[in-house]
Image: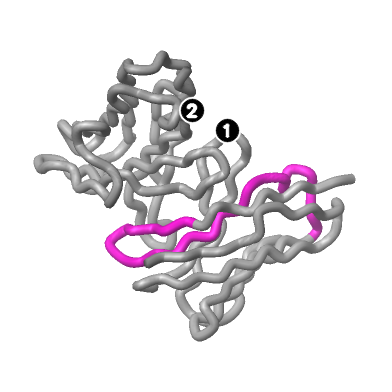
Amino acid sequence: GQNIDQPTEMTATEGAIVQINCTYQTSGFNGLFWYQQHAGEAPTFLSYNVLDGLEEKGRFSSFLSRSKGYSYLLLKELQMKDSASYLCAVFTGSYQLTFGKGTKLSVIP
Amino acid sequence: SAVISQKPSRDICQRGTSLTIQCQVDSQVTMMFWYRQQPGQSLTLIATANQGSEATYESGFVIDKFPISRPNLTFSTLTVSNMSPEDSSIYLCSVEGSGQEKLFFGSGTQLSVL
């Protein structure tokens, strides 16, 4: 079976750093995605990790440890517009993406 | 990147009726996907729609409930049949991407069934 766990909700202060964790147990693994989804909108691509390590892209970084079945998304210099749900998804092959339930991040002044 | 137009963006429907959701892509794509996102739940793949063949449904989803059409390489429809309140959800069309971005998503259809 497929199981992807991430916290349901998080709150952080504007200008701070927040780390959203994701653990997974899946029957296949061809990479891990993070998506951002604002309320009432479609998910938008943030990052893709297929090798262990840290991928940095501006204010957002994503880390993967395949041996531990673990990833995190790091958001720096938080802005109010970063308030959204963040979805962890495992690519199990042939365009099959298995999603976690998402972490709703609230950024407060 | 692909531009995906999905409509309607939202609808409120009566129990027992059916709703057809349309998905139009600005380029030809081989594979199109339909996802459901129930309140507080993860995105779940309903089916994969390939042009010229029957859609492939995931476990728990059947063609009688969610018939899909794929008449050409830029268009697909998903029908939610004989709706009940449990079908209230966001329905998302997505298409294959290239490179790292494996999927592009449409803007979604917010469906409420009374």
Q: Which of A46 and A72 is in front in this view?
A: A72
- Residue B75 place in picture, x, y as percent: 25, 32
**Picture quadrant where residue A95 is located:** bottom left
Magenta run includes residue A83: yes
Above-or-below relation of A49 to B43: below
- Residue B15 place in picture, x, y as percent: 39, 17
Q: What stretch is highlighted in magenta?
A: A77-99
Chain letter of the residue beneath label 1 in the structure image: A
Q: Residue furthest left?
A: B52
Colouring used for the render: one colour
Disc 2 target residue:
B110
Res B23 seen here: yes
Q: Which residue lies furthest to the bottom in this view?
A: A67
- Label 2 neighbour load within 10 Å: few <14, some 14-19, many 20+: many
Q: In this view, does A1 lie to the left or right of A57?
A: left
Q: Looking at the picture, which amino acid does disc 1 mark? A: Gly
Task: Give residue A40's mark.
Answer: 1
Please report the residue visible at 25 percent of the width from the left and 32 percent of the height from the top: B65
- Residue B37 place in picture, x, y as percent: 47, 41
Discs 2, 1 touching: Cβ within 8 Å:
yes
